[in-house]
Structure formats: C-alpha cells, structure tokens
Image (spheres, coloured by chain):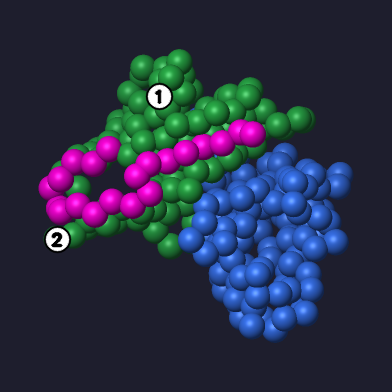
Amino acid sequence: SAVISQKPSRDICQRGTSLTIQCQVDSQVTMMFWYRQQPGQSLTLIATANQGSEATYESGFVIDKFPISRPNLTFSTLTVSNMSPEDSSIYLCSVEFSYTYGYTFGSGTRLTVV
Amino acid sequence: EDKVVQSPLSLVVHEGDTVTLNCSYEVTNFRSLLWYKQEKKAPTFLFMLTSSGIEKKSGRLSSILDKKELFSILNITATQTGDSAIYLCAVEYSGGSNYKLTFGKGTLLTVNP
C-alpha cells in the first residue's frame, strides 16, 4: 500500500489565522481525499482533490474555508482558513493506492484552535 | 440519505472474550465495505469486503458481508488489551465521477486485563 507523510502532526492556532496541512504520497495517485474528524465523531469527507483540476467539495464544505491544492500526482495541501474553535478536529488525507487494500490514510493532523 | 450505522457504539470486555461488531448500511451504487481500526489519529485498514458470504480472516479477526440484508459483522476472538480502539465501518460507493467513502460513527472497544 502507499505510504503517506502528513504534516504537521499537531498544532495549536489562534482564531482568525490559517493553517496549511501537507500530504506527500510515495507513489503517484489520481485522487486524494481530505477528511475531518471532530471530537467524538466519525470521519467526514471534506473534498476530493484531482491533479490538474479544482477539488470537488462535499455538502457543507466550501473552497473559501478549505482551499485545496494538488500541484502533482504525489502531493496535496489543505488549508483551514479563518479558523474558529469549531475547526478543532483531526484532519486526515487519504488515497486509494490499490483496490485490494482499500484506502490508506495519512498520520493525521490534530488541530486545536484557541 | 446514504448512511452507515454501527452498533454498539461502545463495548467493554475482558481479555479473552469474543466480540461482534455490527455495521448496517444504506447507500446507492455500493462498491465495497471496509473495516478500519483507529487507535490514535490514522485509521489502519483491516478488511475490504465486496462479495456476500465470503469470510475474510486475519489472525483473530474475521469479517463477513451480507449484501442482501445490507450489513457486515467484525468478529474478534480471544481479545487482548491491544485490541482496544475505535473500529470504523466505511462503505465505498460511486458518487458522481469517482468513488468515495462514508463512515459510521464507530464502535469504541475497551478490553480490560
């Protein structure tokens, strides 16, 4: 399966600021997925990022709040903009490297907004 | 609305017990059902199920899918304290131009010595 390096691992940020999360995959993949896991909740898909095109956002998520870049087939970033305490969550990137082995997840970013 | 429902939401057992975790789903354009174990932040892959009635096994863990009744179970035998984690069920479905996952809320399993 793919190896995904995600950073930062954790951060504490002031409200009103922005944080950019990076994911680097060790193989080329067509699509990368970004998830949010709020405290005590399950994973919710934010958007799907294809290389060379704009990300596709799920209902309830907008590009102005969660801009995504996908400059090549191994890298993507998610920015959490104008943060509020409600954005405190774990953010995860994911890829489907091999159909047989499902989706692989990055190590996650634990974000706390104060 | 598509959804994945897991039960129980939490479970406390003693080492050596056998547990059964449940996952029911309602999605259109189903492709597969996946089980993950989440201990800290990143979910780790356990099983992918696509066909009914075929059991997948890995050590003390096993899982089976019933596509007619739209559910899956995850069994863990001879539980150990290291099995303590959140177990997530996810369903892969076709959502427009690509496949995507929708997750259940998870089952928090606590195994006491």
Chain A visual colour: blue
Residue B40 x %, y %: 43, 62
- Identify by letter the chain in green: B
Is there one chain holding both mark 2 and mark 1? yes
Q: Residue at 69% across / 66% down in the picture?
A: A21
**How many residues crowd around disc 2 within 10 Å: few (fewer than 14), some, or many (20 or more)?**
few
User: In the image, is residue B61 above or below residue A9?
Assistant: above
Residue type highlighted by circle 1? Leu
Number of numbered callouts drawn: 2
Residue A76 x %, y %: 73, 56
Q: Would you say residue A3 is visible in this rendering?
A: no
Tell me the quarter of the picture where residue B88 sits. top left
Residue type highlighted by circle 2? Pro
The chain that hosts pointer 1 is B
**How many residues crowd around disc 1 within 10 Å: few (fewer than 14), some, or many (20 or more)?**
many
Residue B71 x %, y %: 42, 27
